[in-house]
Image: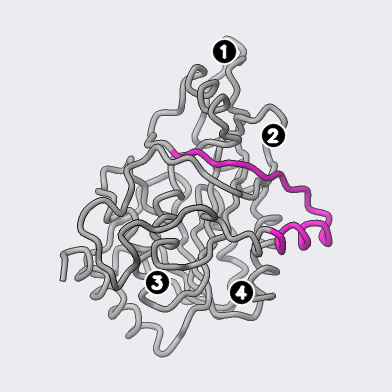
Amino acid sequence: MTDSTTLVYEAAEFLRQRIAGFKPLAGIVLGSGLGQLADDIQDAVAIPYSAIPGFPVSTAVGHKGNFIFGRLGGKEIVAMQGRIHYYEGYGMQMVVLPIRVMIALGIRYLFVSNAAGGVNYHFHVGDLMIIRDHINMLPNPLIGPNDDREGPRFPDMTRPYEPKLIAKAKRIARKNGIFVQEGVYLGDTGPSYETPAEYRFYRTIGADAVGMSTIPEVIVARHAGIPVFGMSVITNEAHDDYAEDYENDGDDVVKAAAAAAEKMTTLFREIISSL
């Protein structure tokens, strides 16, 4: 048993004892400024990451650092109120540890969300983007020995985001009058925001939105055969034609994400209700 496998086992066992028979259908990862969804979880039980043995602690702005167990859309779920980022100085195995723990607890679906810069010129602040594919510029969390019990050595990534869940999300969005974009998410390391030349490069290679997270979580879920639905909230227009006095600001990103969180919550709740 590897060190990371031991950490997963011990954390999952600790949580099982705290939640007494609770079996989450879905796991949800709430990105910067998107923790508001946790307010809609019924019969919620919050367990701080700091209380879980061997668990990393989230230090990013807008990430409270709790596991929330409860019901959303009438189904039992577990939500991460804040994620772990590679730029915080954690190794990749610690970044994806919470996802592996949720898999160990029995989730059958993973929902991921993030705040992202819109490099697509047609994207605007406050837009919701359904992630249909991604470009990974972060270290792959599967590098190293492979445990065949967790998944294959070379997992297929042809459809990293489940087409059936994407189609369902589009129907629910239309029904609720919620405008959604669809596109490719690019994840890089951060924590510095990208330069205008980098934004131009990312747009050229096919990205629609760019951020600093999410993809390692998706890779680990797909490695385990878990279907994934992903959504970005566009919190800034990441173009390369800024005014001379323009600056990217982390607080503005969190505020923009919070303003769109209600629409995202509606989509997540209704998708989960239909599972």
Tell me the mark number nearer the camera, choosing from 4 and 3: 3
State the separation of the CA atoms marked 2 and 1: 22 Å
Binning the other alpha carbons within 10 Å of mark 2 as few (below 14), some (14 to 19) or many (20 upward) gives many
Answer with mark 3 or mark 1, whichever residue precedes in sequence: 3
Q: Residue at x 58, y 72 (%)?
A: 41
Tell me the mark number nearer the camera, choosing from 2 and 1: 2
Residue 12 appears at what percent x and percent y? 31, 76
Relative to residue 210, is residue 64 drawn left or right? left
Residue 184 appears at what percent x and percent y? 58, 41
- Mark 1 highlights which residue? 245
The answer to which image quadrant residue 55 occupies is bottom left
- Mark 4 highlights which residue? 72
The answer to which image quadrant residue 151 occupies is bottom left
- Quick one: 4 or 34, which is closer to the camera? 4
Amino acid type at image mark 2: Phe
Answer with mark 4 or mark 2, whichever residue precedes in sequence: 4
What label sits on residue 123 in the rendered view?
A: 2
Residue 118 appears at what percent x and percent y? 61, 33
Quadrant in which the C terminus is drawn:
bottom right
- Image position of 23 with respect to 268: above or below: below
- Quick one: 228 or 241, which is closer to the camera? 228
- Image position of 55 with respect to 199: above or below: below
- Mark 3 highlights which residue? 103
- Could you tell me which secondary element the residue under label 3 belongs to? helix
Amino acid type at image mark 3: Ile
Answer with mark 2 or mark 1, whichever residue precedes in sequence: 2
State the separation of the CA atoms marked 3 and 1: 46 Å
**Start-end of magenta stretch:** 167-187
State the separation of the CA atoms marked 3 and 2: 33 Å
Residue 238 appears at what percent x and percent y? 58, 27
